[in-house]
Image: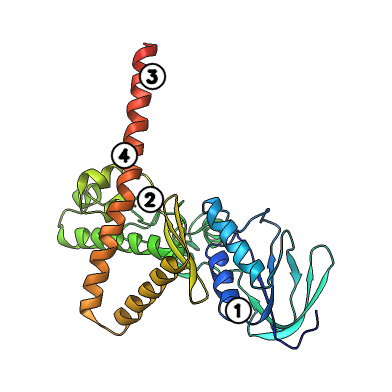
Amino acid sequence: MQDSREIRLTSFSESVPGSMPCALHANAAVPSFLRMLVLSSCCSVRLLQRMPQKAGYTASRWLRLAGVEVLHGAKVVQWPEGSRQRLCSGTLITQSGREISADLTIDCTGVKLNTELYTSLVEDREGGPEAAAEASRQGIPVKPTLEVVGCPGVFACGDAAGVAAERTAYTADLMAVVVAKNIALLVSRKDSKDAQKKLKEFPGGALSNAWLGQGLQEAPSIAAISLYKYDGIMQFNNLIITGPLAAGTKVMVEFFQLGIARGNTILSKLWLTLEAMNTVMAALPLVLWHKWTELKAFVQAYEAF
């Protein structure tokens, strides 16, 4: 694979939360480069397996047109020395024994879950080492309220929390809202037992509307992936939007986040309002479908009786 242009080699594993979008962002950043995208053995025949099929097909088509070779089932077993700590050139070896040389390697296999604080809390308890090892793989065990199991008054959110929801920035925001509400509740109530009974559960507790909150059984799927400047993939539950609109949405998200990081209170309040509106719009069809399923099951049980 000798070429006058730089070769960018990206390897990632879909079993690691966030690795797929990270790899796509890395490959799409400089489309004039010649790149190869290596998938681990846990991937089957398409990208973005946890998103609707249209998202995976769109990503595959964009990468193919950009000159990216996609290798399915090509798990990297040996990286160039030092490539896991910094960008460097070298040769990778896949599980099948294939050697791939590159001018630049980027490891996008995700990051290890940060569970060190949890480990310090449980390591001296019976079964603590096993619990800590499990948490490092699956996330910190939490109750539906995101309170850490066995650690009253301690909450976990973000990638470190062991929840069934997809680990995305949007999901982390919802968890942060639930945790903030629960901490405020515990602080404001003198009776801790009474406060425990009224703790909000994830994901419904993030919503202000009680009916929607009680009926929401799973976190809405909202995500945006940029494919260079003018293309992208946006997910809104089962709806997939591609093209300039998705790319523009990603730009808007980054604009808001950078402004909030700089301490812009106006952008912060506006972002919270927009996020709340998106959550309600995404949660409503999920709640209605859940209620319809319950009603259908009740009718079937009644007819059987």
User: Which residue is identified by label 4?
Assistant: 288
Q: Where is residue 174 in the image (x, y as percent from the top left)?
A: 33, 60
Q: Residue at x 27, y 43 (%)?
A: 214
User: Which residue is identified by label 3?
Assistant: 300
Mark sitting earlier along the chain (3/1): 1
Query: In this rendering, would 283 be left or right of 78?
Result: left
Number of on-image labels = 4
Q: Position of residue 132 (x, y in %)?
A: 53, 61
The image quadrant of residue 271 is: bottom left
Looking at numbered disc 3 in the image, what kind of residue is underneath it?
Answer: Gln
Looking at numbered disc 1 in the image, what kind of residue is underneath it?
Answer: Pro
The image quadrant of residue 155 is: bottom left
Query: In this rendering, would 163 be left or right of 277?
Result: right
Local secondary structure at mark 4? helix
Looking at numbered disc 4 in the image, what kind of residue is underneath it?
Answer: Leu
Q: Are marks 2 and 1 in contact (CB under 8 Å)?
A: no
Dot 4: within a 10 Å radius of its alpha carbon, few (fewer than 14), some, or many (20 or more) residues? some
User: Which residue is identified by label 2?
Assistant: 143
- From the viewer's side, name the closer residue of 61 and 177: 61
Q: Residue at x 58, y 81 (%)?
A: 30
Q: With respect to residue 126, does 172 lie above or below?
A: below
Label 2, label 3: how far apart the Cα atoms are = 32 Å
The image quadrant of residue 142 is: bottom left
Local secondary structure at mark 1? loop
Query: In this rendering, would 270 be left or right of 175?
Result: left
Query: In this rendering, would 116 be left or right of 133?
Result: left
Local secondary structure at mark 3? helix
Q: Which label lies toward us, 3 or 1?
A: 1
User: Which residue is identified by label 1?
Assistant: 31
